[in-house]
Image: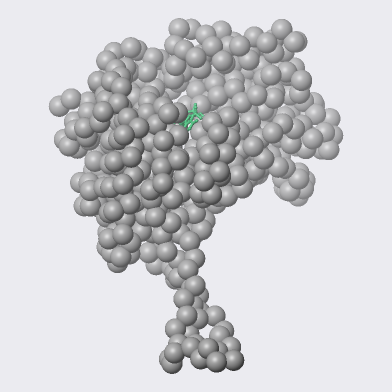
């Protein structure tokens, strides 16, 4: 079976009329598949179809909609082994990370099904003696734009709740992940019994993305990606008065206090910076470490880096895969090189090796250096020091982002005091910045988002709107 057939349960790619692209195994160059992307016209057709099909889906009992999610969950688990290999090859990740995407998606499907068991309205006091109540109704057609780094899980965190709550979804994955992030998901749901047209994929670049945002049949945009693109999407959707959910970039701090178990903190810090080659929005971008333990902590990070094995994603022994593309390698190298020129020290790594960038530990980093202020999106542990708790909070809160943060320390009361002062949508005490679940509200503050949250009950706010109803026993008496 071809790669496409394996990933699409034998259903193959739908016909599209955009550019043809050759997908290659990230880091290796072997051809994976030839794929046709979507055109602007395909977006129009998909949105129109979604609009038409959504009406019937909204009146399908929610228990039946939840059943589709249950079947999708069973299919994902049944095919997890082959899907894991496919996701790893297309996204340039190790098998473990690909498995995290599948397990995370299973959890999103379970959390989505749970939404079928909660009340969907409220009854209000009514001075006129009428029945006065509200019900939550679907938003309609959700336009979903996703990045390449976690194409399956980041799509599923929207698809599962949006579908169960009665919406249709038009998904626009990145051009680098059109199969795992698009066609695979559509096929999964079709196979699970979702009527055609309620989930469609229109892979493409910014032009296709903007066509989706501005399409009149699309009621809401859910965007996950960089802050720069998010600003454009937010501006366009805002000008059309569309609901828009923006989950954007981060440069996440981890504060390491002086009262800490160095080895366990460094293990968590290394996982935070090196997992999926640092290509995670919640990656630990800055390790802000008390000056009295900074040397020991940096040494422990170097030991953690030494345990990682760089290599092809097809090798099960590999624990660190390639960087997604050359532009991203150049960006990581540029940020590291400029910071070194300004006085930072490379303790390990620091030089690209072809398509790979080794785990790197950079010390002596100050807030004026790019390694401190920019989102690197590569496997670089940036170590900066502090001498007072106030300075730690100031350093952690500097910059425009506010996605995730962590505080490590054995004095829980002190760690909690600091945690309360951090600007971030998620703060974890004695845990990693890349913590994620399907049932908790996740969202960025500052330039990491537009203030909303996805996950658990927050999804009801995201993918429904409120309608107020009244019912009178007798016709309204309009004679005053
Ligand atoms: P990106 O912004 O370049 O692309 C993301 C998606 O947006 C892609 O599908 C792309 O085609 C599309 N896009 C780009 N410009 C667009 C435009 N003008 N109109 C419509 N669509 C457009 O980001 P990326 O490089 O794919 O992903 C990495 C970034 O995503 C990082 O900054 C990372 O922090 C962020 N991210 C955030 C989260 C989160 O939950 N907050 C999760 C994962 C990644």
Name the residue rendered at 24%, 52% in the picture. Answer: 194
- In the rendered structure, the answer to whether residue 149 lies left or right of residue 90 reads right
Residue 449 visible in rendering: yes
Q: Nearer the viewer, residue 122 or 305?
A: 122
Task: Give 147 or 256, whichever is nearer the viewer.
Answer: 147
Rendered location of residue 400, percent (x, y) = 69, 33
Which image quadrant: the C terminus? bottom right
Relative to 102, residue 323 above or below = above
- Left or right, residue 8 beside residue 351: left
Residue farthest to the front, as pictured = 479
Residue 196 pos. (x, y %): 23, 48
Image quadrant for the N terminus? Answer: top left
Task: Please give the name of the residue rendered at 57% of the width and 50% of the height, measured from the top-left corner.
Answer: 452
- How many labels, in total? 0
Query: Hey, which quadrant is residue 96 in on the image?
Result: top left
Relative depth, front residue between 169 and 343: 169
Q: Residue 133: horizontal and vertical position, in percent? A: 49, 77
Name the residue at 59% across, 22% down: 376
Give the residue at x 34% y 12%.
28
Q: Is residue 302 visible?
A: no
Q: Position of residue 388 (x, y in %)?
A: 84, 34
Which color scheme did the rendering employ for the protein? one colour
Q: Nearer the viewer, residue 332 or 210?
A: 210
Q: Is residue 118 left or right of residue 451?
A: left
Q: Is residue 479 above or below residue 17?
A: below
398 on left or right of 46: right
């Amino acid at each position: 079976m071809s790669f496409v057939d394996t990933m699409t349960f034998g259903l193959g790619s739908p016909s599209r009329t955009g550019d043809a692209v050759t997908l290659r195994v990230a880091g290796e160059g072997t051809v994976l598949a030839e794929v046709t992307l979507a055109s602007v016209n395909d977006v129009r057709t998909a949105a129109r179809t979604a609009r038409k099909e959504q009406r019937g889906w909204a009146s399908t009992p929610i228990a039946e909609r939840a059943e589709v999610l249950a079947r999708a969950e069973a299919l994902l688990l049944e095919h997890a082994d082959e899907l894991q290999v496919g996701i790893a090859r297309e996204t340039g990740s190790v098998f473990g990370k690909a498995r995290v995407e599948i397990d995370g998606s299973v959890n999103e499907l379970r959390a989505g099904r749970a939404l079928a068991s909660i009340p969907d309205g409220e009854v209000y006091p009514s001075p006129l003696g009428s029945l006065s109540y509200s019900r939550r109704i679907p938003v309609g057609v959700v336009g979903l734009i996703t990045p390449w780094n976690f194409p399956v899980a980041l799509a599923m965190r929207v698809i599962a709740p949006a579908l169960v709550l009665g919406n249709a979804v038009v998904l626009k994955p990145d051009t680098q992940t059109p199969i795992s992030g698009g066609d695979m998901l559509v096929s999964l749901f079709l196979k699970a019994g979702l009527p055609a047209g309620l989930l469609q994929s229109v892979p493409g670049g910014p032009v296709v993305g903007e066509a989706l945002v501005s399409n009149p049949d699309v009621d809401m945009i859910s965007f996950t990606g960089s802050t720069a693109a998010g600003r454009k999407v937010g501006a366009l959707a805002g000008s059309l008065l569309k609901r828009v959910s923006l989950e954007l970039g981060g440069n996440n701090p981890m504060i390491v206090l002086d009262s800490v178990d160095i080895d366990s903190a460094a293990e968590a810090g290394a996982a935070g910076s090196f997992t999926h080659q640092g290509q995670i929005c919640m990656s630990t971008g800055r390790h802000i470490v008390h000056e009295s333990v900074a040397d020991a902590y940096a040494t422990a990070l170097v030991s953690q880096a030494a345990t990682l094995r760089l290599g092809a994603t097809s090798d099960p022994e590999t624990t660190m895969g390639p960087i997604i593309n050359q532009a991203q390698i150049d960006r990581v190298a540029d940020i590291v090189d400029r910071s070194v020129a300004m006085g930072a020290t490379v303790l390990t790594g620091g030089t690209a090796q072809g398509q790979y960038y080794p785990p790197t530990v950079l010390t002596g980093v100050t807030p004026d250096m790019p390694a401190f202020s920019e989102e690197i999106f590569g496997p670089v542990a940036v170590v900066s020091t502090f001498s007072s708790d106030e300075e730690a909070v100031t350093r952690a809160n500097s910059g425009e982002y506010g996605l995730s943060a962590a505080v490590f320390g054995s004095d829980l009361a002190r760690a909690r005091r600091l945690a309360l002062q951090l600007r971030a949508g998620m703060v974890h005490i004695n845990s990693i910045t890349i913590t994620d679940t399907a049932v908790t509200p996740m969202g960025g503050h500052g330039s990491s988002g537009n203030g909303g949250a996805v996950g658990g009950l927050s999804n009801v706010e995201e993918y429904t709107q409120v309608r107020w109803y009244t019912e009178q026993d007798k016709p309204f008496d309009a004679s005053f």
